[in-house]
Amino acid sequence: MSVIAWPVEPFAVSDMLRALEETVEEMQSTSMSALADAELRELMHSVERVGRKLGVVSHNVVAEVASRGSYSEWGYRRVTSMLTGELHLSSAEAHRRVRVAAATCPTTGITGEVTEPRHFDVAMGIYDGTLSEQSADAVLTVLDKIPSAVDDDVRVSAEATMVELARDLSPREVSGVGDRLLAHLDPDGSLTGDGDRARQRGLSVSAQDAALMSKLTATLDPATRAMFDVLLDAWAAPGMNNPDDPASPAGSRTDPDTDRDLADAAAGRDTRSAPQRRHDALSAMLSRVIATGTLGSHGGSPAQVVATMTLDELIAMSGVADTMTASQMPVEDLVDLAKENNALLGILDPTGMPLYLGRTRRLATVAQRIAEWLRSRGCTFPGCRVAQTRTQAHHLDEWRNGGPTDITNLGAACFDHHPMAGDEPHQWRTELVTEGRYRGRVAWIPPASIDPQRRPRINHAHHPDELLAQAWERVCDDRAGPARRDPWVT
């Protein structure tokens, strides 16, 4: 069996897609009540298998788009950006689809020669419908961790083994079995080299949950782990950096300036768990580094906690403040940071306009970047969730064309979307909205290849309350037609 497909005429693809959609619609309207339990079970498995097979088509499309570079002609810098923009996939889903497609789809060389997929066994598992995209990705994650010193024939056997196991396991179980396989291939770690460790290193922070808490996950290389241990030994010692104890010494227990008697007394009344002490040590270290003022700026934004709240929230010392890094924190905690000169506060009136901006430097570029954030809260490209601190100041009227560096001509754009703005046929045009409910916001006008009518779009990703309000308006008015709907919502 082969996964290498023969080319077909475009009209044949359209006919097949139309027939497929008609079949699916017919099945959607079919009642399941007359089926016996055994038939329902068989149908459940069959539908899942067919859906997985259909995923192969999606992978082939993604691989072809990547090979041609079509995404750039459609106004996107990356394939993943195209998937999130066109199909509204999450970033994680888009990256997984691209990874699986790159590993399981045939490739065509410059001479036209078609070669088999890089991971043939994984490709066959998806092709016959026994592997889901999630399971395939779990297998690929395990295979990527195999040390480079392992022989090729062992790698091939490992892939075949993992695919065979994955047919009957969940993605999480695949990861667990994969850990056992990796331990078998390199039991004492002697085959793992610096390149393998460098490839696996990483650190990630989850989105905040309902309690505004985040999970920190890291894979540290040996040197970083050793330094982290030193930090924890000194800063996470019992009694040190305890936010619940005003008499707790700050900084390192091993610092010669630390009062040992005071530290010992604080340790005696310290009821925190070891994980809590480690958390507080990291928080204290971050506060110390930010307070030094040596971080400079990033993309024109101050390397400092910058957050905004309303005047009423400040007076009541309640509510939640939004930060320039797209996180949230209680107003009371933010005020405590500001007291230590570790935060800049932006106070807003009830309409969302700034009343006051506390700052320690009189730099026009910093002030403009903060003003951009108060207006847009991050990258202004439609659907983008990148925080303000990871954006660049984009000139709506290009600087090379004489556009001024004024706040009315600036908008935040992340590193992926900034190059997409311009006057070329495949680029997006940007302009400032001058009237209506989004007055003062940046609108992106797509190229004709995406929208022939080139209708402007506003980014609501940083303003979910806007989408909720618009949806509620439509729900409350059953007569709302296209003319009543917000033209900025796509």
Image (cartoon, helix red, strand yellow):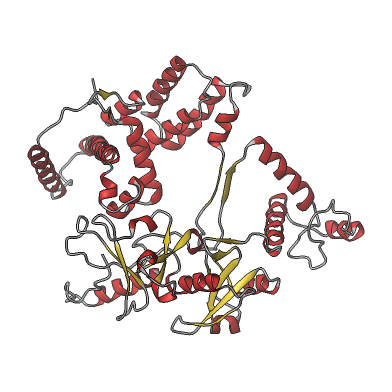
* Horizontal side, residue 56 vs residue 366: left or right: left
Give the camera-side residue of 452 and 277: 452
Indicate the position of residue 105 as horizontal and vertical percent values: 29, 31
- State which quarter of the image contains the N terminus: top left
Give the camera-side residue of 459 and 336: 459
- State which quarter of the image contains the C terminus: bottom left
Indicate the position of residue 365 as horizontal and vertical percent values: 53, 70
Q: Quadrant of residue 8?
A: top left
Q: Quadrant of residue 435?
A: bottom left
Identify the residue shown where x is 66% and y is 73%.
338
Give the camera-side residue of 58 and 437: 437
Find the residue positioned furthest to the right. Answer: 261
Q: Is residue 48 visible?
A: no
* Horizontal side, residue 104 vs residue 203: left or right: left
Q: Is residue 173 visible?
A: yes
Label total for image: 0
Indicate the position of residue 273 as horizontal and vertical percent values: 72, 52
Identify the residue shown where x is 36% and y is 62%.
381
Identify the residue shown where x is 73% and y is 43%.
229
Give the camera-side residue of 265 and 490: 490
Q: Quadrant of residue 335?
A: bottom right
Position of residue 425 relative to residue 183, above or below, is below
Indicate the position of residue 412 as horizontal and vertical percent values: 43, 65
